[in-house]
Image (tube, rainbow, N blue to C red):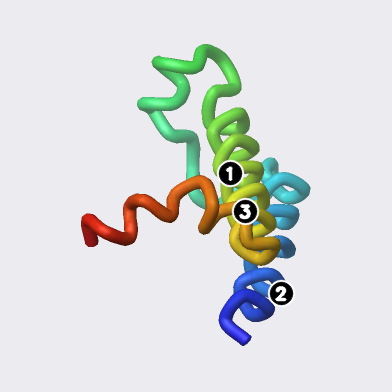
Amino acid sequence: MNKILVFLLGLPLGLVLMIYRYKIINFTGKIDWAEQKLGAGGSYTLVIILGMVIWICCMMYALGSFDQLFGFLYNFF
């Protein structure tokens, strides 16, 4: 049940971040760190990267490959 919930909430969240990045940046303002480190338009790039990371991690978790890749970390925490 937990994996289905992550799948149903995480994938649309990642897609919404990527699709509505312009509106999100207009609402929150530009991120100075991203503009400095990633160049002009860095805030938009950071939101796209964040959306892709959320989407990929949720997909990996829902399909079980996240557990296979990072399963060794369960012993530490």
Which one is earlier in the sequence, the residue at label 1 or at label 3?
Answer: 1
**On screen, 38 above or below 33?**
above
Residue 55: percent from left, percent from top: 66, 52
Residue located 43% across and 55% down the image: 71
Left or right of residue 19: residue 1: left
Task: From the top left corner, tell me how far across and down residue 9 is, in percent.
Answer: 65, 72
Q: Quadrant of residue 75?
A: bottom left
Q: Amino acid at mark 2?
A: Leu
Q: Position of residue 53 (x, y in %)?
A: 58, 44
Residue assigned mark 1: 53
Quadrant for the N terminus, please. bottom right
Real-space CA distance between mark 2 and mark 1, rounded to the nearest whole angstrom: 16 Å
Residue depicted at x 69% and y 42%: 22
* Secondary element at image label 1: helix
Please tell me how crowded label 1 is: few (under 14), some (14-19), or many (20+) other residues with Cα within 10 Å.
few
- For badge 1, the amino acid type reads Val
Looking at the picture, which amino acid does disc 3 mark?
A: Ser
Depth order, front residue of 67/32: 67
Q: Is residue 27 above or below residue 39?
A: below
The first of marks 3 and 2 along the sequence is 2
